Amino acid sequence: MYEIDKFLPLMIPLTALLAVPLIYFFRNQRDIRDGVSVLAPGTMFALAFLVFKNFYQNKEPLFIHILDITPTVSLQFRVDGASILFSLIASFLWIITTIYSRGYLGGLREKKQTSFYAYFALTLFATQSLAYSGNLITTFIFYELITLFTYPLVTHKGSDEAIKAGRKYFAYLIGTSLIFFLTAIVLTLSLKGEMSYKETGIFDGSESVEMLLLIFLFFLFGVAKAAIMPVHAWLPAAMVAPTPVSALLHAVAVVKAGVFVLYRVFNFVFTPDIIAGFNGHFIALTFSAITIVVASMIALRQDNLKRRLAYSTISQLSYIIFGFSLLNSHALTGSLYHLIMHAFGKITLFFCAGSIYVTTHISEISKLDGIGKKLPITMFCFAIGSLSMIGMPLFGGFVSKYYLLKGIAYSDYQLLFAIFGISTLLNAAYFLPIVYAAFFKPPKEEIHLEAKESQRSMEFALSITALGTIVLFFVHGFFYPLIGV
Amino acid sequence: MIVYIILIPLVTAIIIPLFGFINKKLPFYVTLLSAFTNFILVIRTAKKIFSYGTERYFFGGFEAPFGIEYVVDGLNSIILIIISFMFFIITVYSKRSLEKEIENRRLPLFYALYTLFYTGILGIVITGDIFNLYVFIEIASLSSYTLIAMGQKRNALMASYNYLILGTIGATFILIGIGYLFMATGSLNMADIKLRIVPLYHSKMVRTAFAFLTLGLMLKLALFPLHVWLPNAYSYAPSAMGALLAATGTKVSAYALIRILYSVFTIEFDMKIIPFNQIFLLISLVAILAGSTLALAQTNLKKMLAYSSIGQIGYITLGISLSNATSLQGSVLHIFNHSLMKGGLFLIAGGIFYKLNIENIYDMKGISKRMPYSMAFFVILTLSMIGMPFTVGFLSKWYLILGAIEVGRYFVIPIIVISSLLSLIYLWRLVEISFNSDVDKKEISEMPVSMMVPVIIISLLTVFLGVFSDIPISLSREAVKIILGS
């Protein structure tokens, strides 16, 4: 039993890796290939659930040592609440995204579908491995692999614009991680001689304040996947990718991987007490608060629907970083909840954007007037997603905002309530007009629907995630043992 | 008997022209056989060294310090392994590649000189006698001048001539240095000189010898700014020869430099009596940045790889100049890794030329559709060049960074990081151009199997040794033990 316990978490990323040759092998039988793409995340989800069950019984984090690369650098996995949480969500949403992609790619008659699915599986392999990483260097390796595997997805179209965007994507993510992230890891290792995550933190507070602050900042800005300003520009650029990629990777897997690394840094490399010791949280609070407000303001001015969603993601990611830097357990709970709630809400919105694009070829918000009559299910789910993003009760987004607000109340910075107030207003200001225009304004010009047959699988997928945001509001207690603060 | 490591290729080089009289195709098979035998011999010798310690051979039975001595110890066995491995694998590759680049009638000549070059570099590594070192340097150099001149283009002649002039200056400097050392100590055996030289550290003659030796070797090493001969030599030589030069030529000079600095002179001399290490550190850092920057400006694939080599040589000398156990391990690892990676990259460049006749990077639009496997391996080797964990390239950079931190030289870290970014840019450029384009789907036309297999083996090795890194790390640890004499 014990042996299986150790083996089980490793099976999850391996399943994704195994799916790659299968997808390639069945490249000419489209149905089998798509079947593999659904079966693999299904297996992973089941496995993650088993891991969750074991964890629920023991409540002890599990360490798995794979191999040593050098005497100080080793490949190590750690299974604890947060990693299971991340793994569950990523694998569940992958199932839905595959169903959605079938409709999307079919509707647009995209080329290179097989390589699309293959790189998708590879990305999920890296994401799952990152979720279970047990030390800084393992995290770094899979962090870089995610960038590498998503690059072909971002440049999928192969047009000049896509290549340019891909270059920006690559430069930002690889550049910051090599310059800052890796340096921070090397400095940590040279100071403390180890880099495994520990509840008590790698640093013990005996180091010089300047050095700690430097390393902390290197981590904060080196993990550009968390898209804190000013290292956020890659995310809007990545929107040239096909919508399923934007949905799963740039609203869930990739950006959440960045936030997840920061979660490890805030709580397992440093500890809240040590961060408070050198006032690192103050800088993180400032930058994340600025990002929350500024990104929302930029989102307000975007006419391209996907770009608006991208800036909204930047803003929402900073909620999570904001919660980490409040340094209390309520805010941390709120942050981890936001990781789930934002994933479901944003993936719904992206699915809707893609569905609109496939059926009507519209990507600008100003042309969406009256589209609600043509695409009632899509726009209804869009409304649900928006309400969840704004944080209305009865929707998942409320849970995380509630805990985050509680976190502010328990911190020394009650003034920050204002940031939340402003941001919520801004969220409402950039989402609700779309919903209003879709349902209540008369259409400016006649809208033609195409690709009806692919609409069904897309609407099925986006209804499930929209339903998810509502269900999560009622069953959020289910995740409490995983978040367990 | 370690002397066979030299004798086999030497004898092969001599008899190859005879086989050439019988059939123009025979020399290849003879070379292949001898390369394979030699590789096995080196592996067996290395195994023996690691269990029983250093092995010596006295030429003609005259014992050192009077006779010529051959030594295989922990340090040079790792170099011998990589050289003989790369030679064997490039020989496999050379058959089809040369069919395109060299006329049939000159094949025996090529293989004879090619094996002679191999003899020379093996000799540099294996010898324990400093004058013998010079002789082997000349053997390797002279044969390489001829081999470079065999390149298809007329520029090859110019490249060869340039290298001839600069290489001769370098070799002459080395010879002058050896002469001064002999005058001062009366000995030519490395181990013997090391003992006799200690009381003479303040003698002007010894210092002059040191200056000539290091300068001569830096020229052979193509350390920036003495690198001008290298890019043309690498890129105009026949593909197989270019790959062999890139994989072994400068690496052997780096090894010779380590030998001179640590086994003829001592660390006290390098660091305390003259501030050589500080100057050397500075030159290395400049070389790292200059090489990467110059590579960025190239449009010819092979030239870009050659300039990248100049930057990578900076890494090797960086570890030497930091002179602590960790950084030296990084240097030895980098000799090993870079030989593997750059050899592989040159082989791919040669393959692209073989199949599509393209050398300019900007003409390579959409070639990943025609040569998907080659480009996939190119990406793997690129990642290794950048220093991605799980590839061998990571190991050496990691040890170099740790070594720099150990002696408190933190400013080395940003330079290594910047150079990694630069190499990412210049290598990724090709990946981007070849993978993304609107070119319509074309027929796949990969290189022939005998050229593909070496590339596959090298790429898999860079990953395999990067994951199961026990082998290179324990080998390089043995090497450092020898360097630091503990």
Image: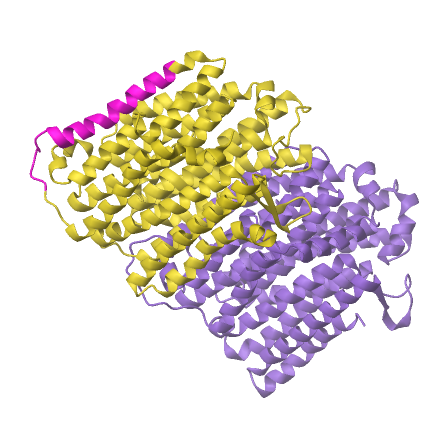
Chain colours: A yellow, B purple
A148 displayed left or right of B398: left
Q: How many marks?
A: 0
Instruction: Please tell me whether residue A294 is drawn above or below residue B325 in the rendered image.
Output: above
Instruction: Please tell me whether residue B462 is drawn above or below residue A85 in the rendered image.
Output: below
Q: Residue A289 falls in which quadrant of the image?
A: top left
Position of residue B441 measured from the top left corner of the image (x, y, whole percent): 30, 62
Which quarter of the rendering shows the N terminus of chain B? bottom right
**Looking at the magenta stretch, what is its main secondary structure?**
helix
In the depicted view, which residue is nearer to us: A63 or A424?
A63
* Residue B226, visible in the rendered structure: no
Q: Residue A448 falls in which quadrant of the image?
A: top left
* Residue A310, visible in the rendered structure: yes
Magenta-drawn stretch contains B445:
no
- What span is in magenta? A418-447
In the depicted view, which residue is nearer to us: A445 or B74?
A445
Position of residue B222 measured from the top left corner of the image (x, y, whole percent): 63, 51
For image coordinates 44% across by 40% down, the residue present is A171
Position of residue B403 measured from the top left corner of the image (x, y, whole percent): 70, 40
In the depicted view, which residue is nearer to us: B161 or A323?
A323
Magenta-drawn stretch contains A438:
yes
Residue most toward the front? A57
Position of residue B99 measured from the top left corner of the image (x, y, whole percent): 49, 75
B285 displayed left or right of A367: right
Instruction: Please tell me whether residue A180 is drawn above or below residue B70 in the rendered image.
Output: above
